[in-house]
Image (cartoon, grey):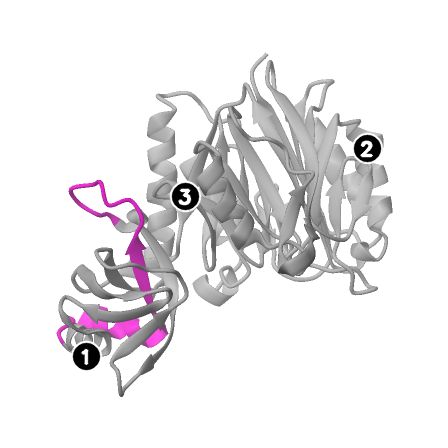
Amino acid sequence: MSVRIGTGLSRLGQPRAAALDAASAAAAELGVARCDLAVVFASGTVLGAPELVLEAVHEILQPDGVIGCGAGGVIGHGQEVEDGTAVSVWAATLGDGTATTFHAAVEELEAGTGALTGMADLTGADGAILIAEPETFPTDAVLRFLSESTPMLPLIGGLASGRSLDDEAVLFIDERVVTDGAVGVRLDGVEMLPAVSQGAAPIGPELTITAGEGRVIGELAGKPALEKLRDTIEELPPEELQLVQGGLLMGIVVDANKPDYLQGDFLVRGLLGADPDTGQVALAADIHPGQVVRLHARDAESAGRDLREALSIRMTALGGRTPAGALLFACNGRGRGMFGREGHDVEAVSESLAGAPAAGFFAAGEIGPVGGGYFLHSFTATVAVFA
């Protein structure tokens, strides 16, 4: 049996009723007796009783494993609900594949250090999904650790963005609701292709960092960094100069072993500030001399085009096979805020993946690989495409 996926979404106001409705729709679309994995996202008033949501999902689907979270907005069954009450259920039968769920946490030790516990060993896995609670789980640090310690694999996910009526985080793991750490699933024998669309357009020329350390760039192309950036912006053509009004960012090439750098080869980060006296520029990422950077700007048209191109590449990688479905983790700054309407990203996923079912949520940060490492992004859409 091959991988099969079904999705359901309900806007009913009662936790149990909404979860029963969404899970029943997912079960009908799944169309098989067995559910190996369910991924559940809930927003609004249903988070007042998340246990009832979880119980209803188990009642309908009887899944072997469950992960999920509370969200500021959910995605599913061709819809985006950016605010208000909704439950989205994604259900999968994995054929000969397996799903191993886990609940990870970081325990504080002496001298300000921490120990990662409960995290599945991802060595040899075919893919993984990670959903983290942002206040209790140091996602950036864990992703750096995984980048250094684990051979690269498709790792996609996001930061939980919704809280219960008691102002507690909500994470779903199997038959429990937990309030801290991260939940996830290791996938084996399942072909999962990651796609990362960072929602920013490259502008201006590529520049090389010639001096700097930590998060401070001292020089770009042999000039004080601030002076070089000013010169670069002044030389932009009018159409690119207009994009700068939406906010200036910087893309860093992570994998330098390429002859040319395309839009998806840059890790996009925000500029934190500049010192006119020294000409230094601070960036929201660690840098080192020799790295290639390029200015980027927020742009809805470019973000939409980039997402579709990223998904088109995954369709090509499937070699004519139909995708079973997808999980979509979209920044809570996208949606209406970026595109002026609801539904942009889920429509792009559906159209690009030949109508394959998709579900997900609007995250407070998105997890996805870029250039040989795992990173936490913003204003990004990260997608797990299942063959």
Check disc 3 and report the residue beneath it.
373
User: Badge 3: how crowded within 10 Å, few (<14), some, or many (20+)?
Assistant: many
Which SS class for mark 1? helix
In the rendered view, would you say 49 is above or below 386? below
User: Is residue 253 in the magenta section?
Assistant: yes
Compared across the picture, whether 155 is left or right of 186 comes to left
Disc 1 to disc 3, how far (Cα)?
31 Å
Which numbered disc covers residue 227?
Answer: 1
Report the side of 122 relative to 73 (left or right).
left
Sequence-wise, the earlier of marks 2 and 3 is: 2
Pick whichever of labels 2 and 1 is earlier in the sequence. 2
Of residue 184 and residue 335, the one placed in the foreground of this image is 184
Residue at 41% across / 38% down in the picture? 352
Expressed as whole percent of the image width and height from the top left, the position of residue 48 reads: 84, 57
Badge 3 element: strand
Q: Amino acid at mark 2?
A: His
Q: Nearer the viewer, mark 2 or mark 3?
A: 3
Residue at the image point whose x is 22% and y is 40% from the top: 257
Contact, mark 2 vs mark 1 (Cβ under 8 Å) = no
Q: Which image quadrant is residue 63 in?
A: top right
Sooner in the amino-acid sequence: mark 1 or mark 3: 1
Tags 1 and 3 in contact by the CB under 8 Å rule?
Answer: no
